[in-house]
Amino acid sequence: MVSDSQKKVRIRCDAFINLVKELNEQPSLKEIFGSQVCENLIVAADRGDLRLEEGGTFDLSPEERGNFLGVLQGFVGGKGQDRPGGEGFEERVRIRCDIFSQIISDLCASEEIKSLFGGNPLEFLYVVADGNDLRIEGGEEITLSEDQNTIFLKILEEIIEDNTGS
């Protein structure tokens, strides 16, 4: 369950939840996407990179796209690139930011998960891009036994199902 930070881009789950809250409060993004900004954004794994993107429901003008990318660049750094395309684009794992944030919150509210991690799991869990796959993994700060890892994955699967219906 340990992420190899040399090969995967990752962000701590607590930082991701804070990012979602801050994006939802951005006036310039509210002008583009409405009051619940993150209902219209997705987080995607793209060739080992984590990306925040417009979810495909808006036809952004060049000015809106520039504003959106500029705000993202201010929050997460990087180049603020437009949505990628090309080979493998459709195979990427992607999910609405608000739903993903809720999955993380539900995971961290679970008493069983708190017990596994010996406290607040937000300190030990990361959102990870592994190729085109999006994962929630533990960091180097904690090592779960095989049984604990099985329990963690079972609870995570149930929470994902509860939040996505799949």
Image (cartoon, rainbow, N blue to C red):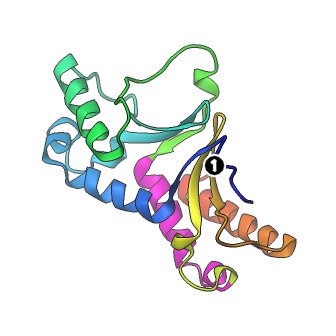
Q: Residue at x 43, y 57 (%)?
A: 16
Amino acid marked by disc 1: Ser
Front residue (pair 139, 89): 139
Question: In screen coordinates, is 71 left or right of 111?
Answer: left
Q: Residue at x 75, y 66 (%)?
A: 154
In the depicted structure, whether residue 155 falls above or below residue 74: below
Which contiguous range is marked in magenta?
Answer: 97-115
Quick one: which residue is furthest to the right in this view?
146
Question: In screen coordinates, is 18 left or right of 45?
Answer: left
In the depicted structure, whether residue 58 falls above or below residue 1: above
- What secondary structure is found at the residue carrying circle 1? loop
Task: Provide the residue designation for mark 1.
Answer: 5
Question: In screen coordinates, is 31 left or right of 88?
Answer: left
Q: Residue at x 17, y 21 (%)?
A: 63
Residue 27 in the image, given as x and y percentages of width and height: 13, 47
Residue 37 in the image, given as x and y percentages of width and height: 27, 46
Q: Residue at x 36, y 29 (%)?
A: 79
> Mark 1 Cα within 10 Å, few/some/many (few <14, many 20+)?
few
In the image, residue 91 lies in the stretch drawn in magenta: no
Residue 157 in the image, given as x and y percentages of width and height: 69, 60
- Count of marks, rendered view: 1
When asked about the image quadrant of residue 17, the answer is: bottom left
